[in-house]
DNA sequence: AAGGCTGTCAACCGCACGTCT
DNA sequence: AAGACGTGCGGTTGACAGCCT
């Protein structure tokens, strides 16, 4: 039986406060990214290491490009998804300043919907042969 | 104006994988 | 070789804002 990654008792959960963000930024600025497990204690944060890592990678890193995806980025995501599937970290690696979480969210909320409305199966990127109406016909 | 619905996004959870002992 | 440990990844959830009726 594997131990949990962190002590569930006594660690904060949910949205990060400005103070917590600042502590994490300050710590990483001085010591760099390193051992996530020991980082929270060293930085004075009541969070688990995973939570710190996620917060840093997805939100606090200075090279993150925030805001809407451009048409070129969207096209690239679609192409890469067709090639790689749900390998979000690989896809994000090809998009400078974008994170896997951001790409995954954008795919699920925008692109997937768009492809479905165009009659394209977002899983295999092929045109659906059977019109959706056929599924609602009993027998 | 208010209550319900829907979409978006930050964050958590559990598993997989690589490394170390 | 095998188990323990730390980290990374993908799926999923929950909060919240904006839209609709």
Image (cartoon, coloured by chain):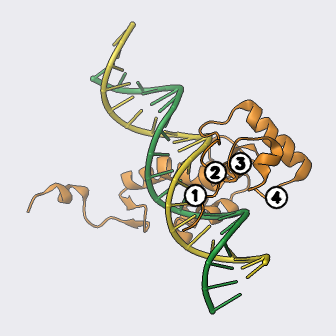
Chain colours: A orange, B yellow, C green
Residue A7 marker: 2
Asked whether, in this view, residue A115 is left or right of residue C10, the answer is left
Label 3 secondary element? helix
Residue drawn at point x = 80 percent, y = 36 percent: A22
The chain letter for the residue carrying disc 1 is A
In the image shown, does B18 or A84 lie closer to the viewer? B18
How far apart in space, not on screen, are marks 4 and 1 (Cα)? 34 Å
Q: Which residue is mark 4?
A: A34
Crowding around mark 1 (Cα neighbors within 10 Å: few <14, some 14 to 19, many 20+) is few
Are discs 1 and 2 located on one and the same chain?
yes
Q: Which residue is mark 1?
A: A75
How far apart in space, not on screen, are marks 3 and 4 (Cα)? 11 Å
Q: Are marks 4 and 2 in contact (CB under 8 Å)?
A: no
Q: Position of residue A99 (x, y in %)?
A: 66, 53
Q: Are marks 1 and 2 in contact (CB under 8 Å)?
A: no
Q: Which residue is mark 3?
A: A52
Q: Quadrant of the C terminus of chain A?
A: bottom left
The chain letter for the residue carrying disc 2 is A
How far apart in space, not on screen, are marks 3 and 1 (Cα)? 31 Å
Residue drawn at point x = 76 percent, y = 47 percent: A40
Foreground label between 3 and 1: 3
How far apart in space, not on screen, are marks 4 and 2 (Cα)? 19 Å
**A39 above or below C18?**
below
Q: Position of residue A83 (x, y in %)?
A: 55, 71
How far apart in space, not on screen, are marks 1 and 2 (Cα)? 42 Å
**A44 above or below A17?**
below
Crowding around mark 4 (Cα neighbors within 10 Å: few <14, some 14 to 19, many 20+) is few
Asked whether, in this view, residue A55 is left or right of residue B14, the answer is right
């Amino acid at each position: 039986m594997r131990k949990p990654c962190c002590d569930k008792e006594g660690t904060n959960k949910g949205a990060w406060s400005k103070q917590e963000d600042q502590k994490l930024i300050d710590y990483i600025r001085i010591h760099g990214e390193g051992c996530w497990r020991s980082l929270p204690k060293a930085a004075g944060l009541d969070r688990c290491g995973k939570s710190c890592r996620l917060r840093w990678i997805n939100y606090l890193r200075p090279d993150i490009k925030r805001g809407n995806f451009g048409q070129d980025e969207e096209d690239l995501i679609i192409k890469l998804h067709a090639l790689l599937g749900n390998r979000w970290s690989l896809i994000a690696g090809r998009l400078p300043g974008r994170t896997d979480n951001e790409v995954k969210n954008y795919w699920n909320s925008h692109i997937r919907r768009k492809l479905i409305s165009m009659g394209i199966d977002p899983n295999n990127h092929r045109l659906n042969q059977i019109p959706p109406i056929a599924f609602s016909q009993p027998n």
